[in-house]
Amino acid sequence: MSSSVTTTSSATGSFTPELFAAHLASVSHLPAWWLDRKREAWARFMALPLPKRTDESWRFATLTGLKLEGYALPPAVTVAELGHAPIGIAKAGKLVLANNRFVTQEAISAELVQRGVIFETLQNALLKHGDLVKSHLLAQPVKQGSEKFSALHTALLGDGAFVYLPKGVELAEPLAVFHYAAGAGAAIFPHTLIIAEQGAKATVVDFFRSADEGAHFACGRNDLYASHGAQLTYVAAQTWSRETLSFQSNATVARRDARVQSLNLHLGGRQSRHESHSQLQAPGAHSEMLALTVAHGSQEFDQRTLQIHQAPHTSSNLLYKNALLDSAKTIFSGLIVVDPDAQKTDAYQSNRNLMLSDDAEANSLPGLEIQANDVRCTHGATSSRIDAEQEFYLQARGVPKDDADELLTFGFFEEVLSKLDNAPLHDALVDLIKLKFKKPAGAS
Amino acid sequence: MSQLEIKDLHVSIGEKQIVKGLSLTVRSGEVHAIMGPNGTGKSTLAKAIAGHPSFRVTSGDVLLDGKSVLPMQPDERARAGLFLAFQYPSEIPGVSIANFLRAAVQARLGEGEELDATAYYKRLYSKMDMLQIDRKFTSRAINDGFSGGEKKRCEILQMAMLEPKFALMDETDSGLDIDALRIVADGINGLRSTNLGVIMITHYQRLLGYIVPDHVHVMWDGRIVKSGDKSLALELEAKGYDWVKNELVPA
Amino acid sequence: MSDVTETESLTAPIADIIDNPVSGIDQTAGNFSYKMDYEFDAGTGLSEKTVRYISTVKKEAPWILDFRLAALKQFYAKPMPTHWATKDLENINFDKIRYYLSSGQKPKRTWDEVPDDIKKTFERLGIPEHERKFLAGVEAQFDSEAAYSNIKDVVAKQGVIFVNSTEGLREHPEIFRKYFGKVIPTGDNKFSALNSAVFSGGSFIYVPKGVKVAMPLQAYFRINAENFGQFERTLIIADEGAEVVYMEGCTAPKFSTSTLHSAVVELVALKGAKIQYITVQNWANNVFNLVTKRGVAHEEAEIKWIDCNIGSRLTMKYPGVVLKGRKARGEVISIALANDGQHQDTGAKMIHAADETTSNIVAKSISVGQGRSTYRGVVHIPKHLKGCKNNTECDALLINPNSRTDTYPAITVRGDRNSVQHEASVSKVSEEQIFYMQQRGLTEGQAMSLSVNGFINDLARQFPMEYSVELKRLIDLEMEGSVG
């Protein structure tokens, strides 16, 4: 497929070779192999076209919203300028990044360091743990449609978070990472890489935030590796400004008897695309994929998932819930693939859309590609309004209709949130949602 | 007059030995009860005799009228006269009781013989009435959405229609309330005859109050450790399975 | 409209539906001419010459020739839809196909040449002797004129018109032209364009207001008309309050020298009317069967597609209903069986275009051996509609380790006054179930048959009795081959 792409065409927008060169200069202290990868990625970004109407992996998405103009690599900001509000949960450690740079941290305890736990910026990890990072960093291919944006991410990735859990280490409290975009037109490339060795157990939370109401560009990635018997819980809470354009992709690799749970909360952005890919590579692997989206105004949330079963006796369970208000739009496209040898797979997928306004639009494309026969696979998608019986019941008890609807809507969310084993984290997420409901629709 | 001989049977699931040398002979007209605590291999024994693919006979034999059934497929054993009343009968969506039984009855007829539909339905309804199963059930998908009691009664209905030589009843009383138990017991008692041999596998004594066995065997750790008559069941009930462990099992 | 992809073509048919009520219809039934004696040979390959030839041979009015030629241009312009459909489509060699055959030219084979498994199927299904030769391609004619004329006379008394496409357009343009090519526009997809260029055969039916046709109308008797149904074009119009059931196909395997079948079926159910369209397809395993079927249901009307796909190498068929009037109802019931070397790629499209419309899709597929079954669905409820409901259930049963199934539904709902529910599952016949049945004396093969028939039972019951009996027997036959 040929495409005549010039440096000034909209297929690359603000992301010019000059911009890339400047970025590369700023990270010249990082290992040569990494810089080479960035150069390759940049070339790919330049060559690939923007998504087209006939691309099945972008079906229903509003392609005209994918404009790459008006962004720049932002300058550094201080903690004070950020106005960072702590989330108020007990944690084992915290890392704050803003505008692609490290800002501040609360380090993990000396005892954890001694046991081999690593919780560092990605740049430090590249310098100190090069081999470990190299074999895992961006090692999983992106194949759900965002190849161009993934290439951009690799090319312009500045700094991110790196978590390494050695064999048998169990963290009682979660690790928290904050990724900020600050200043009008700020383009950031958040990255979180988590490696859990045999039997390790931990929770990692990514917070994606805009420091102001400017139009930001976020193009991020999080990759989770769970080895034999490891248990990982990953939570991402996205609260970008209402004008932000966001791309995020996740790759989860679950090995023998590993259990991974990921929960994505999507609240912000003008248009957001999230791709999540779980690979169940060895017997006993299990991946639970959860997402909760609250769409207001004219927000568009596009979520594409892939559950791929590559070995026998693996399981996966997906529950994605969307609440749609005003004239918002959601797209859920989920595919379960079962390879011919993956007998005794149990795979489930459910997309539930709660329609709360007459102008909202929900699109569901649940999919199955099954090549092994001794399996149990189901998927389901429902789109409906608030249950009239339940609404009436509350009203009959004296609760006004709007309050009843809000109660029922939060009840709708609870099914996903209650799967989190951490009460303070659960509450923190509920607070974020409540905060969003308080803002008048369409507020900039 | 028929005979079912289980000779020093050893059965495994995967690598694990469950039945460890069980011998028993049952003749037509006899009712044997096998009792024992959970996990001792009772269900395994029943399923292995019926030919369930998950269980491997590692040594020993099962002879029906002198002929080994072990080389036979499950359906061949069934047509030879073995019936297993399942502890957890399968649900088969879309297949009605009437059609299912018809297929099973037809399978026993000779090549080219056709089932007489009128006679079949007459017989079916009379058995259903005897077992107090609503005639509407004939068109319901077998076991689909049935209560525990309904499933067990459906098993007995099948036994009544298929007229086996030997019936293995795997915990038929489990999950039944007193009324259901009585109906099931009456059904089985109604089928007792000199042409039928029964092995009842049960954990509790109460079924044996309704279906009085000729012989009672206690199973422990994969083999029979004591045999007696119906009074053994009462003794077991009074003393509990720990008695078996302490008194009966060789150290 | 700029966001609509080729697979959807959602708004095109809606925009083009004509609103004028049917009026001033001539209710006298036309004469049906059964035999067409043409000596000419159109040869192989598709060209403007072929199209003109077809039109001349049929003595068509100029507007029909124009329609065909415009369609031919569209066919050439459109690419193969392999960006979403199987690449197997690239194996169709358009140049080697005969696009028109007159009755004297149909290739035949001797009874000895008929494969044994086909003969066995005829035996199992209890196909009458005299039909077997016709179905197997040993005889070109099927002498059913008596049976057909009977039906025709009975329904003619009710004012029903039941003719083939050529006659329909020639004798009753005032009835059929209004809707011809409007439910499925020529440019809907590459294969509707092909059909629009070279169509012949098929049924054109008009049922007057309030008439409830007592017996199902059958295409079976008319298969001997041109081309073995290669490029059939069917248009059924049920006027207000009318009811009609139409059946095509049969469970018996049908021989065809043509490897490409591309039919178009358009249904129009006016206010309060009901149309039920039943298809059983069992083409030989060398056939590409690419069909476009769609109906428009007006206010309180109902269109129901009952579809069973057993044969062919590749079938692509997504019966659809445009729910154009308030309280219209659309339903697709689909059974697909895919064995070695087969790909059944079927589904449904429900486009809601009015308030309080409801649609229901139930699709069950069975993949045996290395067969592959695919479900593709579109459910579209656009903005500002209220009270619309859709329910979709698709279940796939995989019999052997290498059997394959895919499911690709696309559901779009707008607003908070509608509801959509979609559920799909994939499973195999459980070992416990098989053992249970074996313990009752059924062989493994019999147990499989029973389970599989149970799986489709509630759908099979919706077919007319003779079909569902044959269907069951066919499944028994397929299952016998599946257990090792």
Image (cartoon, helix red, strand yellow):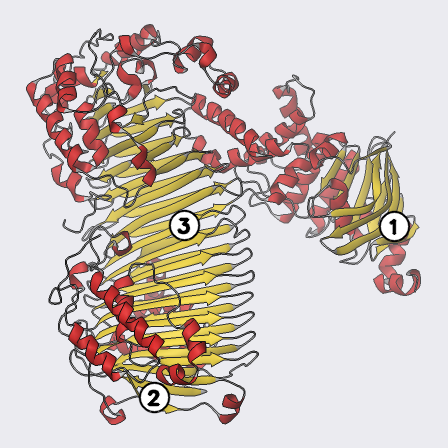
Chain label for disc 2: A
Within the image, what quadrant is residue A420 found in? bottom left
Give the CA distance from mark 3 to mark 2: 41 Å
Which three-letter amino acid code belongs to the residue tagged 2?
Pro
Q: Rate crowding at label 2 as few (under 14), some (14 to 19) or many (20 or more) other CA atoms within 10 Å.
A: few
Give how far across and how far down residue C422 sits, in percent: 37, 49
Give how far across and how far down residue A166 sits, in percent: 53, 80
Give the CA distance from mark 2 to mark 1: 70 Å
Residue at left 21%, top 39%? C79
Give the CA distance from mark 3 to mark 1: 52 Å
Q: Nearer the viewer, residue A27 or B188?
A: A27
Within the image, what quadrant is residue A299 found in? bottom left
Q: Nearer the viewer, residue A430 or A71?
A: A71
Which three-letter amino acid code belongs to the residue tagged 1?
His
Q: Is disc 2 on the same chain as disc 3?
A: yes
| Label of residue B217 in the image | 1
B29 vs A142, left or right, is right
Where C226 falls versus C306 (above or below)? above
Q: Nearer the viewer, mark 3 or mark 2?
A: 3
| Label of residue A340 in the image | none
Q: Nearer the viewer, mark 2 or mark 1?
A: 2
Which three-letter amino acid code belongs to the residue tagged 3?
Leu
Where B18 falls versus A297 (above or below)? above
| Label of residue A86 in the image | 2
B217 vs C188, left or right, is right
Q: Nearer the viewer, residue B96 or B14?
A: B14
Q: Tell me the element at label 3.
A: strand
